[in-house]
Image (cartoon, helix red, strand yellow):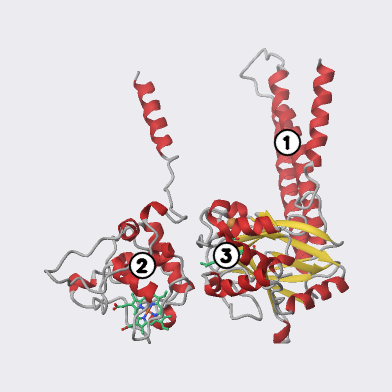
Amino acid sequence: MRLGFATLLSVTLALAACQREERDTRPQSSLGSGGQPTPVTALEPGGQRPSPRDNKAASFEANAFHLSEGKRLFGWFNCSGCHANGGGGMGPALMDQKWIYGSSMESIHATIRDGRPNGMPSFRNMIPDDQIWELAAFVRSLSGNAPSSAAPQRNDGMMPHPSENRMPDAATLGKSP
Amino acid sequence: MKRLASMAFAAASVLSLQGCAGWQSALDPKGPAASELAWLIWFFTGLCAVVWVLVMIALAAPVLMRPPRRTEPLVLDAGADHRKLRVVAIAVGLTAAILVGLTLLSFFANRTLAAIGSDAALTIRVTGHQWWWEVRYEDATPSRILTTANEIHIPAGEPVRLLLTSTDVIHSFWVPSLAGKLDLIPGHINVLDIKADKPGTYRGQCAEFCGAQHANMGTFIIAEPRAKFDAWWNDQLQPAAPPTGDEAKAGADLFLKRPCVMCHKIGGTPAGGTVAPDLTHVASRRTLAAGSLTMSRGNLAAWIADPQGIKPGSHMPVVELNGDELNAIVAYLEGLK
Ligand SMILES: [Cu+2]
């Protein structure tokens, strides 16, 4: 009886190991096309309204797979050429609490997709929409704005900062790490 | 019945040995390194089989043969004990001798392997990527340095030196018909010398688990006569063929205006990405995506339309294109011979 129960338990546990993490490697059309405009300001006549939340923002921002893909693409698409590894160069630092254009997923997505006037190029049509969201999620993790259980935990090259899952949250600390 | 069973067994063994021939088999060597290794494999297996049979006989004998019943169990028989001790000593001595012998054999085989490429005139750098191979032909003249992917052409009958490294995780380069396997390690260069005795196509495979698409990380070594190899090298050095026809021209244009340009290089055009396979002469290769698909117009379209369906997890994202755009890009790439 005891033995039977133990066997059943271990078989159940072993079967649980067959479950594999689902990775969204294809665009999820149910989440929208990514073409929707992001308002530049939340101010509207008649008071401040909450800015609309993009479905993709929510599904990408705390996902370990998307965060690590974003980290790889940040190097592949040479964001580092202007932003170093987050430390800043010709472009602003991305690992501090200062945001010129806002820290939300939506604003960072808009920054990458449409560019910004003082030198940030527009990557519209040059980076598929899902990959822009992955980059946006990764950019947020540079300043500690991603759950440490999901943020990338390893740097392959020399970096000006610890791996993203050990980044202190720049916003709550009030200073750059 | 018994006859039938043994005949079936014999037929099955012959058939399964048949499976050892072909373009990817360590037991069907096509070069000196692989021959040396195949010989070692057979010798080790044969000798160990003989030892195993002898050990089994020595174990079974005392079980099956009852010793004569002793009348007086406490009487010692010094002579018999001495004989047994001698048998044990001889067995231990033989074991040691065999082990030392096999060690020496593999040592000398290793020396032969190391000497194969000592006078190699051609050096190729093979860099592992998740999940494809970057292949760079080194040359003292910079304009003759050639970068391609997944397919390694070599002159037959000549030793070639491969410098193996990786940009992401550890991979392993294994073309069983030509050589043993050797790891590709990030930040480190391993040297593997290979030689193909005769012209032919030999398949290789990544032999170190490297992530989701490890199984679809194949490569081909194509050994050709020297003259043909030189001609191939010169062809590959040419910039990409300019598009002919309206559709291909539109495709060339789209390639530069779409994400493709961020990752891929096409020589002679502004596309200069280095993180993905060089497409300058993509249509001259036999396969797509590291041996996953054979090269054809249909397969090119299938790959570009849905790389994540063919190689889930691959580092080429799905790029949304409408039917016309896809056809145009395929028409362009198909012309890159
Ligand atoms: Cu592998």
Q: CA distance from mark 3 to mark 1?
A: 65 Å
Question: Are both tags, 2 and 3, on one chain?
Answer: no
- Indicate whether A154 appears above or below B273: above
Residue indicated by mark 1: B52
Of marks 3 and 1, which one's residue comes earlier in the chain? 1
Image spot of residue A37 (x, y percent): 32, 68
Image spot of residue B52 (x, y percent): 73, 36
| Chain ID, mark 1 | B
Return the residue nearer the eye: A145 or B272.
B272
Image spot of residue A150 (x, y percent): 33, 58
Question: Are both tags, 2 and 1, on one chain?
Answer: no
Q: Residue A138 got which mark?
A: 2
Q: What amino acid does circle 1 point to? A: Trp
Residue indicated by mark 3: B325
Q: What amino acid does circle 3 point to? A: Glu
Front disc: 2 or 1: 2
| Chain ID, mark 3 | B
